[in-house]
Amino acid sequence: MNPSTAGATTAAGPIALRLLACVGALLAGLSVALAAYAVHAADPAAQQRLQSAAWFAFGHGIALAALAPRAVRLPGLAGLASLAIGTLLFSGSLVGGHFLATPTTLAPLGGGLMMLGWLLWAAASIRR
């Protein structure tokens, strides 16, 4: 057991924390492939959008993988869940716009959820 969480109570349990860490690691790993595609195979018009999707997925994926074990209370867990969903919506919308020619209308919602997630994590960090 992690000494920093010993004796702490969690509303969601270790499965949710492991799932968030796994989602983070998958986001980070897939973002490397997306960045490689953007640089080597995408047309110049799509490169910036795909690089943005990769950058946000990588950064937030690393954050999820690193912070999930510390989310021992509900505000922190809610913040990380918001980060995960927001990143999937934001990056997924940009990637879907390129590969599936779908509208990117979910990107702003994803960005808002990422902002909310960081605010919730900040609040949870102060309340420790």
Image (cartoon, helix red, strand yellow):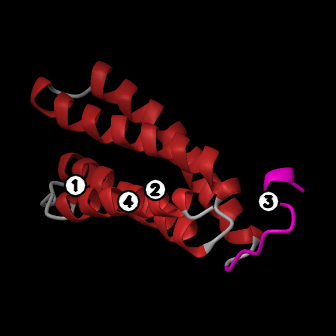
- Give, as a single range, the part of the protein colored magenta: 1-11
| Residue 69 seen from this side | yes
Q: Are marks 4 and 2 in contact (CB under 8 Å)?
A: yes
Residue 117 placement: quadrant:
bottom left
In front: label 3 or label 1? 3
Please report whichever mark, 4 or 1, sits nearer to the chain's N-terminal start. Answer: 1
Q: Secondary structure at mark 1?
A: loop
Neighbour class for label 3 at 10 Å: few (<14), some, many (≥20)? some
Q: Is residue 11 above or below residue 108?
A: below
Q: Is residue 85 left or right of residue 49?
A: right
Q: Secondary structure at mark 4?
A: helix
On the rendered image, what quadrant is the N terminus found in?
Answer: bottom right
What residue would you read off at disc 4? 119
Asked whether residue 9 is drawn in magenta, I would say yes
What residue would you read off at disc 3? 5
Q: How many marks?
A: 4
What residue would you read off at disc 1? 100
Please report whichever mark, 2 or 1, sits nearer to the chain's N-terminal start. Answer: 1
Amino acid under disc 2: Ala
Q: Are marks 2 and 1 in contact (CB under 8 Å)?
A: no
What residue would you read off at disc 2? 122
Q: CA distance from mark 4 to mark 3?
A: 21 Å
Q: CA distance from mark 4 to mark 1?
A: 32 Å
Q: Position of residue 81 (x, y in %)?
A: 49, 66
Q: Position of residue 94 (x, y in %)?
A: 23, 49
